């Protein structure tokens, strides 16, 4: 089936580009002798997890416990939970999940450590954990210099065992130029190495993990690092293009839309609005994003605004002439949020739909 025959709006992915992206990140990990643990909130798909595992991923990083619960069917054996688990019901689910796969928890406080410790003792088990390090995002985590202090307060807990440290240099998404990206990458690496050095004097660490897609792509070396955890690289998107990480031709995921009205010259209305393209211009302050996506093959056409169901294209009518019923493809600003808006992604190769990819963990946010 030709992809232009798909009902719009819908999300499509170029399989050749996606497979190349997956392989190249796996090759980067092999080259630098680090383990690849991709963050799967980008795609939430069993199909794509299998592709990542096939290319050498050692495990997966999940944002939510519910993602892990459904995606272990893809053959995953090891899971890292990116954030602290708070709440009795979630701890109960963690215990159940740990019966099927190896689960590594993340903490950044004595309180979250106590919850895990109590549950572990009651269930006659031990949870492995990593300490979350704040490398500049100022979201979760402890500052590198406070890592040892936190560990001192929980090192005698019998139900949990420290196995490493991890960070996410997400502040890179606020970068405005190449130097900002490099600076954020250096900050991320320095933070995780500083924290690991403090703890290595007390215990062995099997995990020293960092990684957002931009910082992993930018770092010249990974000396002292043991794991990388990028996510967006599977698809890439307009934010990665704006940061200079990849050219737009590397973006695999697009939203296919139809022009349904041309009320006046220079303004066209498409059937894709915020419920599929999303009102996302960068989660951490990036102001270099213009509009709500990149219209493929039409340089200078702006996705100017979105309502829930419709989008407005602004363009130079002397340069371009659109028609009602015409399809356009838009590289979204943020692929991760777009994927979570649909049940299925249509995978194509040379314009022919080859596979329908279920977004297995779509909407799972607990």
Image (cartoon, helix red, strand yellow):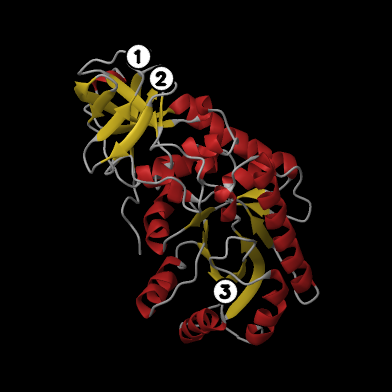
Q: Position of residue 86 (x, y in %)?
A: 43, 76
Give the side of residue 186 with respect to residue 228, left or right: right
Quarter residue 134 falls in: bottom right
Position in image of residue 168 (x %, y %): 59, 57
Q: Mark 2, mark 1: which one is toward the viewer?
A: 1
Identify the residue under disc 2. Answer: 298
Marks 3 and 2 close (CB-CB < 8 Å): no
Q: Residue tagged by mark 1?
A: 320
For the residues marked 3 and 1, what is the alpha-carbon distance in whole angstroms?
53 Å
| Residue at 60% across, 35% down | 244
Disc 2, disc 1: CB below 8 Å?
Answer: yes
Q: Secondary structure at mark 2?
A: loop
Please say if the residues under marks 3 and 1 sit with CB atoms less than 8 Å apart: no
Q: Which residue is mark 3?
A: 108
Residue drawn at the location 30% of the way across and 13% of the way down: 321
Q: Residue at x 38, y 73 (%)?
A: 90
As rendered, which of 262 and 361 lies closer to the eye?
Answer: 262
> Relative to 178, does residue 198 appear above or below in the rendering?
below
Residue 173 location (% of width, % of height): 55, 49
Q: Earlier in the sequence, mark 2 or mark 1?
A: 2
């Amino acid at each position: 089936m030709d992809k232009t025959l798909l009902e719009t709006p819908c999300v499509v992915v170029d399989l050749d580009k996606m497979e190349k992206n997956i392989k190249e990140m796996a090759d980067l990990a092999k080259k630098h002798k680090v383990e690849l643990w991709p963050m799967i909130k980008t795609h939430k798909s069993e199909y794509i997890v299998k592709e990542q595992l096939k290319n050498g991923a050692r495990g997966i990083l999940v944002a939510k416990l519910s993602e892990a619960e459904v995606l272990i069917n893809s053959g995953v054996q090891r899971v890292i939970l990116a954030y602290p688990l708070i709440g009795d019901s979630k701890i109960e689910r963690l215990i159940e999940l740990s019966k099927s796969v190896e689960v590594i928890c993340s903490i950044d406080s004595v309180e979250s450590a106590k919850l895990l410790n109590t549950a572990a003792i009651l269930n006659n088990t031990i949870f492995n954990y990593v300490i979350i390090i704040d490398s500049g995002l100022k979201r979760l985590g402890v500052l590198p210099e406070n890592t040892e202090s936190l560990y001192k307060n929980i090192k005698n807990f019998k139900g949990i065992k420290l196995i490493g440290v991890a960070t996410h240099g997400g502040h890179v998404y606020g970068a405005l130029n190449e130097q900002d990206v490099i600076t954020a990458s250096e900050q991320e690496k320095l933070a995780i190495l500083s924290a690991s050095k403090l703890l290595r004097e007390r215990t062995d660490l099997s995990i020293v993990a960092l990684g957002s897609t931009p910082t992993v792509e930018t770092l010249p070396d990974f000396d002292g690092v043991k794991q990388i955890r990028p996510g967006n690289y599977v698809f890439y998107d307009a934010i990665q293009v704006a940061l200079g990480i990849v050219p737009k031709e590397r973006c695999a995921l697009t939203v296919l839309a139809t022009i349904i009205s041309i009320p006046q010259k220079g303004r066209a209305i498409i059937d894709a609005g915020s419920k599929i393209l999303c009102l996302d211009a960068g989660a951490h302050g990036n102001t270099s994003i213009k509009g709500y996506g990149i219209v493929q093959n039409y340089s200078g056409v702006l996705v100017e605004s979105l309502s829930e169901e419709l989008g407005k294209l602004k363009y130079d009518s002397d340069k371009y002439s659109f028609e009602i019923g015409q399809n356009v493809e838009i590289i979204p600003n943020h692929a991760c949020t777009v994927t979570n808006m649909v049940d299925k992604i249509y995978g194509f190769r040379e314009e022919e739909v080859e596979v329908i990819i279920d977004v297995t963990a779509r909407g799972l946010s607990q």
